[in-house]
Amino acid sequence: SGGLVAYAESQSDAGPPPIDSNQNEVRKKKVVVLGTGWGGTSFLKHLDASQYDVQVVSPRNYFAFTPLLPSVTCGTVEARSIVEPVRNIIKKRRGEIKYFEAECVKIDAANKNVFVRANTDTTLVGNPEFSLEYDYLVIALGAQVNTFNTPGVEENCHFLKEVEDAQKIRRSVIDCFETAVLPDLSEEERRRNLHFVIVGGGPTGVEFAAELHDYFQEDLVKLYPMVKDLVKITVIQSGDHILNMFDERISTFAETKFKRDGIDVQTGCRVVSVSDKEIKVKVKSKGEVCSVPHGLVVWSTGVGTRPVVRDFMEQIGQANRRVLETNEWLRVKGCEDVYAIGDCATINQRKIMEDVLAIFAAADVDNSGTLTIDEFRDVVDDIIIRYPQVEHYLKSNHLQDVTNLLKDSKGNDRKEVNFEEFKLALSLVDSQRKSLPATAQVAAQQGTYLSKCFNRREQCEANPEGPRRFRGSGQHHFNPFRYKHFGQFAPLGGEEAAAELPGDWVSMGHSTQWLWYSVYASKQVSWRTRVLVVSDWTRRFIFGRDSSR
Ligand code: FAD
Ligand code: MG
Ligand code: MG
Ligand code: MG
Ligand code: MG
């Protein structure tokens, strides 16, 4: 059963609630939050911290605005402009939030404890390890880079996940140019140093390639004129197209633009291994492996589960899953006082077909074995909250009205439906179950949703607001999490961008880049970072980028 329910029971068994000896007050529930990225920060920003005893653990004492990381790799934006100290964020909250700059090394689900290790020098603190008890745990640890165990990747590739990664890339790009102009190098060696390879044609890889191309065209070409004809940028993609998660028009636009810019896109290729000077690539169609010399490789494919999350999954019976699974209320399956949000977790969206009998029974108020049109409409209004696939299904089939589901075999409207017809009407709906993408947008919305659940916990226990037909089930006091997609950008360099906007809108070109500037300025976490980012952009327009190492 759910944590809330369990708590309510233990309260009634144990008599009056525990009283703090000094204050005549119920002990506040302990909430531990792991991670201060998109998910963790948006949870903290909206949490009413006066209701809980809140402790936050993260090895980096800042929030990083990841969408601008590719801009940091070329100095378009400075690293300091895209980070906001955690302590700045939590000091603005009502109530006290404790923050520890430390790494969570283990979650002990059975004893409701997390073990953490501080970053501090051990000569200053005797034992940098300590543990924190929780009543509720919020896991927002994000994901780590997935190397797919490809040999040499760990040692020889750059990643683009953290602020430090972006800073390292910036230095390495300049190193490549400085090395390439040294005397006594063969032309072949100069070319090798100036070959920049990006593995992964997703949004991050493509944006980095575009940034690097701009950096070269706008600034470096003037600073290193002697090697300007030797520079090459290659994007290696295992699928057939880059940006394949976007609308087809966007991938085509991106591929055409890259072709015009001279960025080499190799699709249908898989990287087999990477050494310090060479990258081995298998061309899928031909099956042959070729070896390409490189100066720098940025590895930007897929995400994987962090070891501490993996270990937790093993404790709670999710060992054979790929990603930590939660229900639609973001509670971890098999461990209901623990919540997980963002890239480290995935929602297992329940199938309607698993519940179809119960749904029908609840809707058939008079137990007649049939539903009227009004009853049907009513039940769909309700299940749409619980099963978002209903809405996706209606949208993808362009059905304005749910009763369109109820056509009989001749296409006529039905007046009533029996169970078999009801089941048939909904039979295709589950095919529209979607897992949410690993994006900042999803993580932030989940954090906000969860904080609202925490803020109104008591009120909702007394007056549950979940979809009517599921309120009886005990643990669901809230509507489940619903993701709202606001669109996605793909900056492509040369002041051009592509965007997928809500309502099947696709927008591409220079005006989209301006939209990108304004959206990303407005999305900044604080006025401080907003001013910094905008002034970095302005500085770049006027003076170009800073190419010192
Ligand atoms: P994160 O934001 O990664 O946060 C994880 C947190 O956990 C961090 O604070 C980390 O320090 C902390 N942590 C890690 N290990 C531990 C530990 N052991 N103990 C305690 N804390 C720990 N999404 C978009 O929607 N739009 C974009 O334009 C976009 N661009 C991106 C560009 C780049 C280069 C990258 C890398 C990502 C981009 N994303 C974008 C994706 C987005 O950043 C992620 O989906 C988002 O960060 C997920 O949020 P999260 O809270 O789950 O994880
Ligand atoms: Mg987070
Ligand atoms: Mg982040
Ligand atoms: Mg997720
Ligand atoms: Mg009836």
Image: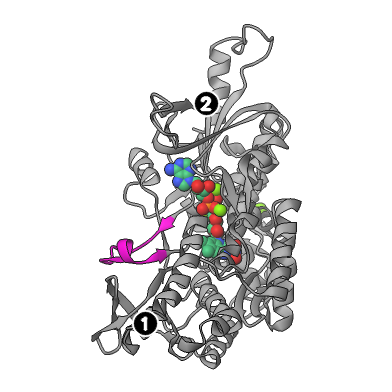
Q: Amino acid at mark 2?
A: Ala
Circle 1 SS class: loop
The residue that appears at 70% across and 54% down in the rendered structure is: 529
Q: Nearer the viewer, residue 417 or 424?
A: 424
Q: Position of residue 232 (x, y in %)?
A: 44, 85
- The residue identified by callout 1 is 183
Q: Which residues are magenta?
A: 144-158
Circle 2 SS class: helix
Q: Which corner quadrant of the image does residue 311 belong to?
A: top left
The residue that appears at 35% across and 78% down in the rendered structure is: 294
Q: Amino acid at mark 1?
A: Pro
Magenta stretch holds residue 214: no
- The residue identified by callout 2 is 6
Residue mark closest to the camera, 2 vs 1: 1
Q: Nearer the viewer, residue 325 or 112?
A: 112
Residue 161 visible (yes or no): yes
Magenta stretch holds residue 156: yes
Q: Is residue 60 above or below residue 30?
A: below
Q: Nearer the viewer, residue 425 or 68?
A: 68
Q: Circle 1: is it few (<14), some (14-19), or many (20+) Cα within 10 Å?
A: few
The residue that appears at 66% across and 69% down in the rendered structure is: 487
